[in-house]
Image (spheres, rainbow, N blue to C red):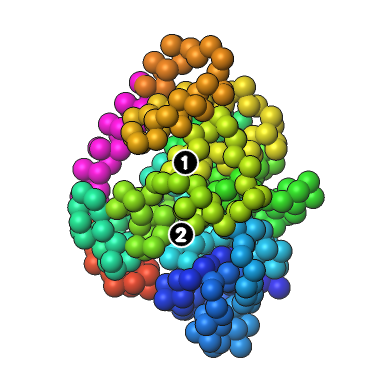
Amino acid sequence: MAFLSIVIPTRNRPQYLARVVELIASNTCESEVIVADNSDNDSLKDKLKKYTESGLVKYYYTSENLSVVDNFEKALEKVTGKYIIFLGDDDGIGPQIENIAHWMDDNHVDAAFSYSDKFLVNYYWPGVKSKFFDDKYSSRIFISKFDGSVQFIDSISARSEVRDAPGTGLNNLPRIYHGLVSFNLIAKIKAKGNLFGGISPDIFSAYQIATEAKKIAKINYPFVIPGGCKESTAGQRAAKSDNGSLAETEHTARFGNSLVWDSRIPQYYSPYNVWAYSLLKAVERTDGKVNDFNFYRLYVISYLRYKNFRSYTLSALSEAYKKPSLAGFIKALFAEFNFFVNRVTNKILKNKKESIAASDIIKAYEVLDSFIN
């Protein structure tokens, strides 16, 4: 049985995943890799043959049309490790990931993560373009300062913060996607139902993990390298091409008739709506604190950033509040202004980060490892 299970759901991106697996094979000795492939064909199997034969990779192909949530849940059923992390097929592990899992085990930590609202490091594969910076991100790893410090997180506060700012991200929620979580904690959640849900498996599962975890650590060290390729959500965000119809966007279209949209969430595809919908479903599933869900913040974001869909935002507003609060809108508008200022500041500071050329995720790991050592 492996100590660490590294789980990678994938669809139609074999060129990235093969390099990710090669990276893991070269830099771990107590891990297994679970690949849950829902591609149009199983050609990835041949690319991974060397690793399946060695026992490192367990490859599972499903031809049935699955949603991202269903593919994540199927993959989870295959893990055997004491600790678990999910990665995207364009992400990489960071140095010392197994040592960090052992530290968690020694200190009885249920869940650990490395970043809140901005990555410690992140990598953009070749071909990624930014609306504002064109190809300046392509084939580069960005590295912020980190010191290896540990902060223990209060679960109640972490959940309250995300309910107050739905759609803006995970903040200080523990997570299994880009984070480490103990198998025992996941088993506890699974005893009550699925870990993944909503339409964004990362935030739905993160809220559940936060509800059940007793000891959560935020480690200021990049044990994961978030990646972005031109086909991924991260790549689409960089290019500002991540919005549209729910029915015409593959991510949501694959849910088919099983997706019953919540009328309080604007009914179009955007990262904010996807995250907010999934968070709302997780809140309903766990602590039930829906009255604390700040829909105003989501509506301000939607109205200001997605002008072509304003009618959808106004429709959702009328569903959530019979008598909307002016104070609620003012508070949300002020919060969004602060968020915008911080985001612009981060964009400027991104140029002050270490930005180093790397042709793929393996080179990115080598750059990071050299930076650390």
Q: Nearer the viewer, residue 39 or 260?
A: 260
Front-lying residue, 23 or 271: 271
Residue 86 position, x and y percent, is 56, 60
Callout 2: SS: strand
> Measured from the top left, where is residue 70 in percent x and y?
64, 58
The image shows residue 73, relative to residue 10, as above or below, that is above
Q: Which mark is residue 368?
A: none
Task: Specify whether residue 48 is in view.
Answer: no
Image check: 1 left or right of 137? right
Q: Is residue 1 left or right of residue 332?
A: right
- Residue at mark 1 to residue at mark 2: CA–CA distance: 31 Å
Task: Give, as a single range, the part of the protein colored magenta.
Answer: 334-354
Quadrant location of residue 177?
bottom right
Residue 153: x and y, percent? 55, 38
Q: Residue at x 42, y 76 (%)?
A: 15
Would you say 344 lies left or right of 69 here? left
Q: Quadrant of the N terminus?
A: bottom right
Is residue 321 at all visible to an observer of this figure? yes
Q: Determine the main secondary structure of the stretch shown in magenta.
A: helix
Question: Residue reaching furthest right?
Answer: 191
Q: Nearer the viewer, residue 306 or 298?
A: 306
Q: Position of residue 235 (x, y in %)?
A: 35, 57
Residue with the mark numbered 1: 268
Q: For mark 1, give the secondary structure.
A: loop
The residue indicated by pointer 2 is 224
Residue 8 relative to residue 334: left or right: right
